[in-house]
Amino acid sequence: MRHTDVLVVGAGPAGLAIAGACGRLGLATAVVDPAPERPWTATYGMWSGELPPDLPTSVVSARAAGRAIAVSEHQLGWEYAVLDVPALQRHLTDGLNDVRVHAARVVGSPEAGVVALADGSQLRASVVVDAGGGARPLDRTTRRRPAAAQTAYGVVVDAAAAAPFVEPDDALFMDWRADHGETGWPTFLYVIPLGDGTVLMEETSLARRPGLPLSTLRRRLHARLTRHGVQPPTDARTERVSFRVDHPRHRAPGALGFGAAAPLIHPATGFSLATSLRLAPQVAAALAAHLPEGPRGALAAAQKTVWPLDARVVHQVRRIGLESLLRMPPADVPGFFEQFFALPDAHRWTYLTARDDVRGIVAAMNCLFRTSDGRLRRHLVTSAVLPAVTTNDAA
C-alpha cells in the first residue's frame, strides 16, 4: 500500500474541501467516513462577500438582500447567498482528484498518525485531520457541563406561502418578535429562499445550554405561521438542526482539528462553512510546505494556520459574547440585537465574519459598549469575568 501523507477523517464539506486541496498540491491523500457518498441534507448559506473565489457560481442557488428584525427592522446592506447543496457536494467530490476514499467508522487514534477503525483495522498517515464535525472522533473530551447548542426546526413552503414574511429576493436573517405567543427562552424566525421557488422557514434558538428542544421549536414555528395565515402542507419537507457552539479547541495529540471540529463554528452565528472553504487551501499549503521536514513540523504549521494568535483572540472574544447571551435575561435579548444591528456596517461585518481582525473586533465591541445603556454595559462586563453559565434550564 502506498504511503499516505494526509488522512482526513470525515467526508462532509470541510473534510472534502481540505482533502481536495491537499490532493491538488500533490500530497497522497485519503478520506475515511462511515458513509462517504451519503447526500448532504443541511441547508448552507453565507454572505456573498464570504464566497470563496474558486466556488463556481452554479453552486449558489439563490441570492437575497438580508434584513433583520429585533425591536425594529434593519436592512443589513449585504447580500445573502444560499447554496445548492447537491451541487456543492458534487463540486467538492469532483475536486478529490486522486484522493482515496475509505468507507469505515473511526473509533479513535491510538498514536500520532494512526486511526483505529471499528472493524479492528488501522489506517496510517503522516498527518491526520479530524474533520468529523461535532462528533470529533479523535478528540472526545469529557464535558464538564451541558453543551451550548444551536437548535432549529424548519419547514419548506412555496414562495407564495412565505409572502407574509419575505418578498422575492429577500432573506429574513433574524426576526426576534415573539409572534409564536410564548414567553421563556427567546427564539427567532429565519427565512431564506432556496432558489427553486420554495422558501425555508425555520424557528431557531441561537444558543442555549443545553439546546432548546426541537419539540418546542416546532410548536413555536407552527404557532407563528398560523398567526400569519400560513399553513404548511402536511407533507412539507422539514429540517432539524442541532449542533454544539461551545466546543473547546481541538487538542487531540497528533491530529489537526478542522471545520466544525476545530471548531471553526462562529459562536455568535453557528456559521462555519465559509471559513472552512476559504481556509482549506491555506492549510493544505502549510502541510505541503512542511511535510518534507517531517510530520511533526507539518502538523504544527497546519495548526498555526488554523489557529494563529489573532484568530484565537477573536474566537475568545466571541466566546465571551456567547456566554453573555447565555447569561442575558430572555426579555432583554431582542433589545440587545436592536443595539447590535444599529452598529455601523463595518463593525457588524467584522464581528460576524472577520476571523483574525483583533483591532476590528475590539473596535466593534468598544462601539457596542459606548452606545449601550448602563444595564447592558454591566452585563457585558460581568459576563467577561464570571464563570460560564452551567445551565439555562431555569430560564
Image (tube, helix red, strand yellow):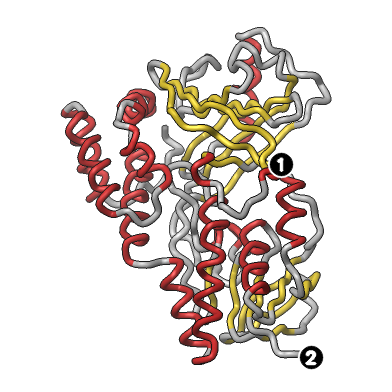
Residue 19, image quadrant: bottom right
**Residue 139: horizontal and vertical position, in percent?**
54, 70
Q: Quadrant of the C terminus?
A: top left
Pointers 1 and 2 in contact (CB under 8 A)? Answer: no
Is residue 210 something that shows in the picture?
yes
Q: Is residue 326 left or right of residue 343?
A: right
Q: Is residue 314 above or below residue 168?
A: below
Q: Earlier in the sequence, mark 1 or mark 2?
A: 2
Q: Residue at x 59, y 17 (%)?
A: 166
Could one spot residue 189 in this view of the protein? no
Viewer-closest of 111 and 365: 365
| Three-letter code, disc 2 | Met
Quarter-wise, where is residue 322 in the image? Answer: top left
Q: CA distance from mark 1 to mark 2?
A: 37 Å
Task: List x then y, in percent, for residue 196.
Answer: 76, 29
Secondary structure at badge 2 equals loop
The N terminus, quarter of image: bottom right
**Residue ID at (46%, 24%):** 68
Residue 250: give x, y in percent of width and height: 48, 67
Q: Which residue is mark 2?
A: 1
Mark 1 lies on a secondary structure that is: loop
Q: Is residue 61 above or below residue 100?
A: above
Camera-side residue: 366 or 189? Answer: 366
Q: Amino acid at mark 1?
A: Asp
Reading the image, the residue beneath label 1 is 84
Is residue 196 or residue 395 the one in the foreground? 196
User: Who's the residue at 74% across and 18% down the image?
Assistant: 232
Tell us which disc is closer to us: 1 or 2.
Answer: 1
